Image (spheres, coloured by chain):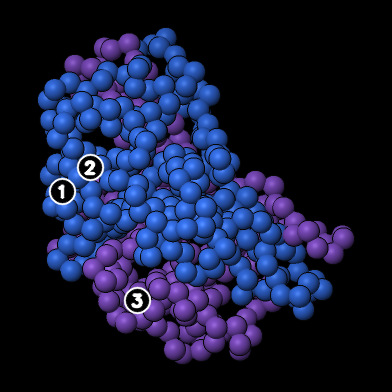
Chain colours: A purple, B blue
Amino acid sequence: MRTPPSPRTRVRRLPDRGAYDRATVDAILDEAFVCHVGFVHDGQPYVIPTLHARLGDTLYLHGSPASRMLRTLAEGVPVCVTVTLLDGLVLARSVYHTSANYRSVVVLGVARLVDDEDEKRRALEALAEHLVPGRWADARQPNAKELKGTGVLALPLDEASAKMRTGPPGDDEEDLALDVWAGVIPLRAAAGTPVAEPRLRVGLEPPGYVTDFERVRAERR
Amino acid sequence: MRTPPSPRTRVRRLPDRGAYDRATVDAILDEAFVCHVGFVHDGQPYVIPTLHARLGDTLYLHGSPASRMLRTLAEGVPVCVTVTLLDGLVLARSVYHTSANYRSVVVLGVARLVDDEDEKRRALEALAEHLVPGRWADARQPNAKELKGTGVLALPLDEASAKMRTGPPGDDEEDLALDVWAGVIPLRAAAGTPVAEPRLRVGLEPPGYVTDFERVRAERR
């Protein structure tokens, strides 16, 4: 889709790299483990990494109700949530055209503190399942005290845009004959062998969703 | 080091996770490929992913002089640059203690547009070498026109703090007997097999710094 949801989410630089369809936006949000939340406090912008999860048209964040991020966002201030997947290092024959292959999403809006207990529980389920699918049903789910002690923020995906770069480097024609290797070093988030918690009961094996854990790259849906 | 460089860089939530010594900050900045730059434009915070490089006490960013990020930051507005390395998914027996192992750095300050051509060249060298060490000497270096066409910003590392979480999940004592696996799924940025640019001259093999490319995890120095 080539139509941005608002003028301020329009990709200005290299507009060919922009995308505004929700399928593209959702796939990037769903693949990334971490987002970066931007907000202003006392005139100073802050960018804080945190976990997120998408449920339909809503992006959920959570944290301690005492944290600066939660307290500030709960006031209904403008927020920007950015998610970036780094797919490769792009080496052109010229340093000038050095680049990176990436897929990113920027969401602008105002977050709402979730009061409803059912919505809060669904958001926490989404956050757990977003990180490691299968975990919610297996682990001990939050009790009333833990639900109360967790702040959840909801940000609508009304104003979101994606930007991406794919493919080989874009060298100038006159550099093609140079005796310099050019191409892409692909990157991905690789999971290693699970490390059991030291006090784990002997004989308690990791479940399949842990041993087989892999973040599959979402293709543009 | 336990002393933050300013009150606003002090880690408030879970202060044990904070670190303020430059060796820790530098190691995280140097290992991460990408940073997230936060700034305010028309009252709206924006968070933009971009490449960065550290040179001594300065963090360098670059981009098109026409980009909103560069134009806004060149005005001398407050900026926040955040770098995050995700080291693992932390699965506690209770969903409530689900977490992530990470190392992050937050740099606050005001960036300066680099005018001096020598400094600009050194910054571009640092940016290329930060991404793939060995690249600057091998590739075609920027000419005068390209230098002019690249905007470089310098942000002093005077006001930087690191925050990290390491180790196993922190379950409550009463949950330790639960029949739920707990532990950490380690994550790392893994490089794949280099993909040559399609028009690469036949027989031009990738150099060792490409075939052996690996981002080594910096231990706390």
Contact between labelled residues 1 and 2, with CB atoms less than 8 Å apart: yes
- Sort mark 1 into few (<14), some (14-19) or many (20+) by Cα contacts within 10 Å: some
Residue at figure coordinates x 21%, y 62% from the top left: B40
Q: Tell me where residue A142 appears, x and y as whole percent.
A: 62, 81
Give the spatial CA distance, label 2 vs label 1. 7 Å
In the drawing, does residue B219 fall left or right of residue B128?
right
Mark 3 = which residue?
A73
Q: Tell me where residue A159 appears, x and y as whole percent.
A: 25, 68
Tell me the chain of label 2.
Answer: B
The foreground one among A209 and A117 is: A117
In the drawing, does residue B38 fall left or right of residue B167?
left
Residue at figure coordinates x 82%, y 73% from the top left: B177
Mark 2 = which residue?
B153
Residue at figure coordinates x 57%, y 44% from the top left: B220
Whether residue B167 is visible:
yes
For badge 1, the amino acid type reads Ala
Mark 1 = which residue?
B74
Q: Which element type, helix, strand or loop, lies under badge 2?
A: strand
Which numbered disc, 2 or 1, marks the residue that appears first in the sequence?
1
The foreground one among A164 and B68 is: B68
Tell me the chain of label 1.
Answer: B
Give the spatial CA distance, label 3 vs label 1. 27 Å
Residue at figure coordinates x 28%, y 69% from the top left: A40
